[in-house]
Amino acid sequence: MKVSIIIVNFNGEEIIQDCLHSIYKQTFRDFEVIIVDNDSSDDSYDLIKKNFSSVRLFKLKKNLGFAKGNNFGYKKALGEYVFLLNPDAVLESENCLKTIVEGFSDIEIGAQAPKILFEFDKSRLDSAGTDFNNLGFNWGRGFREKDGKKFNKSKEVFGATACAMIFRKKIIKSPLFDPSFFMYYEELELSIRIREQ
C-alpha cells in the first residue's frame, strides 16, 4: 500500500461525498481511505457506509477531537505515505495523488504541503504550506493571494496545514499528533517534529 488517506469526520453529511468522489477519481490507485467518525449526530456515518464500501470506516463512541481522531486513524494506516485530508477538501486534479507521490522520489523530502485554494474563489490561496516566526506565530503561506506562477513551483516551506498534508509514515512514530491538542496548532507541532527528522 502506497498511500493511506485519513479523514476525520464530524457531522460531514453535506460535504464528505464531494471529498470522497474526488479521491476515487484519482488516476493513482494504490491507496486506502480511512475515515474516523467522531461520533457524528447526523447521517454521515450511514451515508459513507452505504455509498463507499471500500472505505475503512471507524465510528468512535465520543468526539475525541481532530488530533486524537487522526491519531486513531494513524494507528490503522497501512500506507508508506499518510495523507491527512479534511472532509470539506476536494482534490481538484485527477492527477493530484500521482503528482504528490512522484514528489517523494527525492529522498530528502519527508513531507509535502499541497496548494490549497478557497472553495468559493479558486483564484485565491488559502495556503501553500505554512510560515512561522520566532514569536510563535504560524500562518498560511500566500493566504488570500492570487494563485499564479509564484506558487506553481515546489519549494521548501516551514510546515503544512492538516487540511491537506502528506508525509512518509516511517518518520513519525505513534501518536501522530500530540494528544494534548483537541484541534488547532497540532499541525504546527507536527511540522516542527518532521523538520527535526
Image (cartoon, helix red, strand yellow):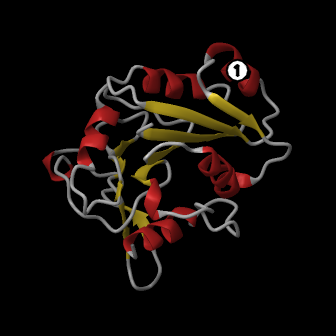
**Residue 53 or residue 18, whichever sits in front:** 53
Q: Residue at x 29, y 64 (%)?
A: 157
- Going by the picture, which residue comes out furthest to the top? 51
Coordinates of residue 97 in the picture (x, y in percent): 34, 35
Which residue is painted at 50% across and 66% down in the image?
190
Query: The residue tagged with tag 1: helix, strand or loop?
Result: helix
Rendering coords of residue 85 (x, y %): 50, 42
Which residue is situated farthest in the right direction here?
61
Q: Count the marks: how many?
A: 1
* Position above or below: 197 against 153: below
1 sits left or right of 67 in the view: left
The residue that mark 1 highlights is 49
The C terminus - image quarter = bottom left
Q: Residue at x 43, y 47 (%)?
A: 80
Residue located at (70% from left, 61% from top): 182
* Residue 143 seen from this side: yes
Q: Pick the residue in front: 147 or 68.
A: 68
Q: Residue furthest bottom?
A: 134
Q: Amino acid at mark 1?
A: Lys
